[in-house]
Image: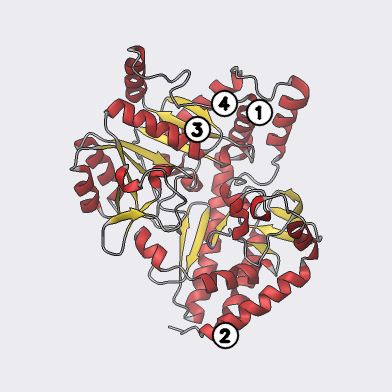
Amino acid sequence: MTTIDRSRVSALVGRERDAYRAAHPGSLRVHEQAGHLFGRVPMTWMSKWAGGFPLAYATAHGNRITDVDGHTYLDFALGDTGAMAGHSPRATVAAVHRRIAVDGGITTMLPTEDAEWVGAELARRFGLPRWSFTLSATDANRWAARLARLVTGRPKLLVFSYCYHGSVDETFIVVGPDGRPRSRPGNVAPAVDPTQTTRVAEWNDLAAVERELAHGDVAAILTEPALTNIGIVLPEPGFLAGLRELATRYGALLMIDETHTISAGPGGMTARDGLRPDVFVIGKSLGGGIPCGAYGLTEEIADRVHRITATGSADIVDVGGVGGTLAGNALSLAAMRATLDEVLTDDAFAHMISLAGDYTEDVRRILDTAAVPWSVTQLGARAEYRFTRPAPRSGGESAAAADDLLDEYMHLYTLNRGILMTPFHNMALMCPDTTDADIAQHAEVFEQAVAELVG
C-alpha cells in the first residue's frame, strides 16, 4: 500500500486554504460581520466547515448551492441529511405555501388532517402503529426515552460508544481506552455524569451488550441500526437480531433511531432488514427541510403508557416533560405529508441507492488503483470513505481512524473544485435530483485529489 507523506499533505492543505480564502471574499465578509452571532455563525456546528470560515450561500435548489460569491456547488452534504429530499423540493414548497399563504395557521396547537395521514404513512413504512411528532430527532429521542423509563420502571439507557442521537445528555458516553465508560471527549458540562444514567458497549459486541443488560437497570437499548455520525459502521451479520433477542430476554425495550439510516430505503433499515423495534425515532429528512421529527410506539408500549398515566402517576398532556408547543405544528405536518407522498418515494430511493452504488464503486476503484489504504462503505443512498483499511467495525475503531489533516485536505480540495461533502465526515448523500453526471464529476475530482496526495 502507498505511504502518504504527511509533509506533502500539510503543504497541499496550505495551498487549498489559500485558494479557498482568495475565492470567497463574500463569505469571509459575512463571517467577519457576524459579530452578534455566537461563534460568528447561526448555530455553532456551522464552524465545522473547512477553510477557516463557512460558505455563506445565496440560493439552493435540488442538489445545487450557489454562494454569495457566485460559485455553484454540487451538494453531497445536503444539510447533513436534513435536505435528503433535495433543496426546496417542488411538492414540499407547494404544500408549505398552501399552508402559510392560502389555508393559514402555521401553528395553532390544534391538529390538522395531515397529521393522521403522516402517522399512517410512517406506520406503513416502519411498522409501528402509534406516532407522535416533534421538531427534531433530538426531541423525539429525549421524549421517547422518558416513555421507555416510564413503562419499564428502569432508570438507564444502553447506547453504543460514539453513537449519535442528537444532543440527548444520556448518550454522550463512550468506552474509554481502559475499557471503562466515561463521558465522551468534548461533552459540554453535563448536569449529571453520563456514567450515572447510561450504560455503554462497543458496536458489534453482543457479549458486551449482554454484560450491561445483566445489571437489570436498562430501560431501553437506544441505537441506530448502523453507526453513522462517527463514520458509517455497518452491523455484522446477526448483530441486530441479537440486540432484539437480548432486549426481550432482559426486559429492555429496543429503541431504533433511523434519522440517518433512512438512506437504506423508504422504510429505512427497519423495513429493509425486518427489524422489530419497540420504539422508533426519526427526524430531519421527512419535512424536506422544514424542522420535524417523530417517534413511533408499538401498540403494546402505547397501551402501557396510557395505563400508567391513567393512574395519575405520570402526565403526558401537560407538565410531564413530553411534548412542546410547536411540536406537531400544521406547517411541519404539511411539509412531511408532501415530502413522503411525492418526493421521497420508492422510485426516488431506487434512483438514489443506485447512484450511491456507482459512487462507491468509483471511489473503491480509485483507491485500489492508487493503492491508498482507505476504505469506502455504502448505506443505501449514502456512502463514506475512511482513512483506514479495513473499514472500522466499532465506534471506537472508527474514532481512532480519524485524521484531521487528511479530512481538511479532502474537504477543501473538493470544495475548491465545486463539490460539497458533509463537514463532519467524508459522507456523500444522494437526493432525487442527483444524476449520473454528478457521480462522474465527483469521481474525476476525487481521482485528482488522490493523485496529488500520493505524488
Give the CA separation, mark 2 to mark 1: 51 Å
**Is 63 placed above or below 108 here?**
below
Image coordinates of residue 187 in percent, x first then y, are: 44, 53
As rendered, which of 160 and 269 lies closer to the eye? 160
Give the secondary structure at mark 4. Answer: loop
Reading the image, the residue beneath label 1 is 331
Image coordinates of residue 105 in percent, x first then y, are: 70, 21
Q: Amino acid at mark 4?
A: Gly
Give the CA separation, mark 3 to mark 2: 47 Å
Q: Quick one: label 3, few (<14), some, or many (20+) residues within 10 Å? A: many
Give the secondary structure at mark 3. Answer: strand
Decide which of tag 4 and tag 3 comes sooner along the chain.
3
Extreme top residue here? 311
Decide which of tag 1 and tag 3 comes sooner along the chain.
3
Q: Quick one: label 2, few (<14), some, or many (20+) residues within 10 Å? A: some
Q: Quadrant of the N terminus?
A: bottom left
Confirm or deny contact between disc 4 and disc 3 (CB under 8 A): no
Look at the image and tell me whether residue 203 can be seen: no
Give the CA separation, mark 1 to mark 3: 14 Å
Reading the image, the residue beneath label 4 is 328
Say the numbered circle drawn on residue 8. 2
Identify the image quadrant of residue 280.
Answer: top left
**Is 241 placed above or below 65 here?**
above
Image coordinates of residue 40 in percent, x first then y, are: 68, 55
Reading the image, the residue beneath label 3 is 294
Q: Is residue 98 left or right of residue 123?
A: right
Decide which of tag 2 and tag 1 comes sooner along the chain.
2
Give the CA separation, mark 4 to mark 1: 8 Å
As rendered, which of 116 and 100 lies closer to the eye? 100
Q: Amino acid at mark 3?
A: Ala
Give the CA separation, mark 4 to mark 3: 9 Å
